[in-house]
Image (cartoon, rainbow, N blue to C red):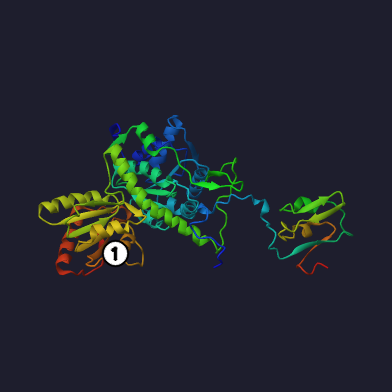
Amino acid sequence: MSTKEKGWREIPIAGVCTKSSIGFMTGDWKTYMPVRDLEKCTTCLTCVMLCPEGAIKWRPDMAKIEFDFSFCKGCGICANECPTKAITMKMPGEEE
Amino acid sequence: MKAKQETIPLNGDEAVALAVKQCDVDVVAAYPITPQTIIVEKYSEYVANGEVQTEFVCTESEHSAMTACLAAAVTGARTFTASASAGLALMHEMLFVTSGFRAPVVMAVANRALSAPLNIHGDQSDSMAERDSGWIHVYAENAQEAYDNIIQAFKIGEDIDVSLPVIVGLDGFTISHTLENVNVLDDQSIKQFIGERPFVMVTTQEGKTVPFKLDPANPMTLGPNALPNYYFEFKRQQEEGMRNALRKIQEVNSEYAKISGRNYGNGLIDAYELDDAEIAIVCVGSVAGTLKVIVDELRQEGMKVGVLRLRTFRPFPLEELRNALKEVKALAVMDKSMSFGGFGGAVFSEVRSALYEVNQRPTIVNYIFGLGGRDTNPHELRKIFEDLARIAKTGRAEMSVQYLGLRE
């Protein structure tokens, strides 16, 4: 066992976590990732509304949608619901 | 200082309800089940009459009742529930969650048999099945002790070195529904005795030291997941809470004796006529009352007999038990539950294991008794002592495990 890990006397009772959860990246273990085709995207924002993680952002400044891969879990709802099939799910490394 | 006391007739369940009322409990969440029903029934009357300030939550199941109690306890509330039999079994999952959260919920269990066949009567199968759930288990001998144990349970479980939930067992019907004269302390003395609930302190990310509880002013995550690299360490912490409880239970027992004049052995074991005993019986719960009467009779007849009642079953009082029984030649352990396919009952295997390292350990036999409320007569208990006298003489037992009062 790594020496960095603490013994039972040193860790807080019952695993209480007093750190803010803002720093927890919950999207770092996905299998598939969404890839957008900006040619087909009509910016209807259906994906933004349906993303269960709030991981798709509408960037009015760029008139584009943007994925936040720190929180996207790769569920594929966006790809499934996109009316113009502008989003496809791919394995990392197959994006192009 | 001695508290003012009043003697009133109460059954075990009513005695528990009254003790909870006097302990200034914030939340009671419960689901009715025989033979515990009178406890929450009586308590709901206190709530309806405005005699207590408790938030009373009627849940749709025992699983929800325990979940509600856990949730209330982690916000800092003093919390109580009661259950038995199938109800306790339905709580099973949440019992582990509650002890893992280190939430000091107190629960009265009016011990009852488990189905099938359906049976509402008393035995200890229900709480014995929760032996490893991480709860402290204290068993009462009578209604008086059920009352006293509830008051002590809050002080034991809430202690910051313990921080564990407590089951107070009382034998179904034998204690729960039997009217006794119970000496009741005045409200003020109990309030002073248990005091406000103390809290373990933890450090927030801003470096503030705050109480370990859910509070919007100091947000924290309780009950997160722990992966294989940390889960084991948290279980070891719980074990430490149990070990600290061994000391705390004894302290609370003697502090309580100061205000009430009543103590139960050293709090862990209640030894009766054991000092020079050559043969003895270990038991849990109400059967101890009858056994003590038999011991008095047999002592009159010149037999050196004694009884050891395990008042605390978890944490298991290993050292105390060993010291109390090391001179005994023949010992019987009584189990009011079965461990199917095991070597005798749960109490038997633990007591036998505890005495393994005693140099001249006694011959130890097991009697399974009283299942499904089967009555246990004084003459049957007397026969155990007669068996033991024979075993002590010969040094050997023909059968290690026997069933008392069973038809062949």
In the picture provided, is B189 more to the left or to the right than A74?
A: left
Q: Residue at point 14% right, 57% down?
A: B304
Q: Quadrant of residue B238?
A: bottom left
Question: In this rendering, is residue A38 above or below B189?
Answer: below
Image x and y of residue B257, in percent: 29, 41
Q: Chain of mark 1?
A: B
Q: Quadrant of residue B405?
A: bottom left
Is disc 1 surrounded by few (<14), some (14 to 19) or many (20+) residues within 10 Å? some
Image x and y of residue B157, in percent: 41, 47
Q: Residue at point 20% right, 61% down?
A: B328
Q: What residue did someone put label 1 on?
A: B352
Farthest-out residue, left: B301
Rendered-image quadrant of the C terminus of chain B: bottom left
Image x and y of residue B289, in percent: 23, 48
In the picture provided, is A24 more to the left or to the right than B10?
A: right
| Element type where label 1 sits in the image | helix
Closer to us: B196 or B225: B196
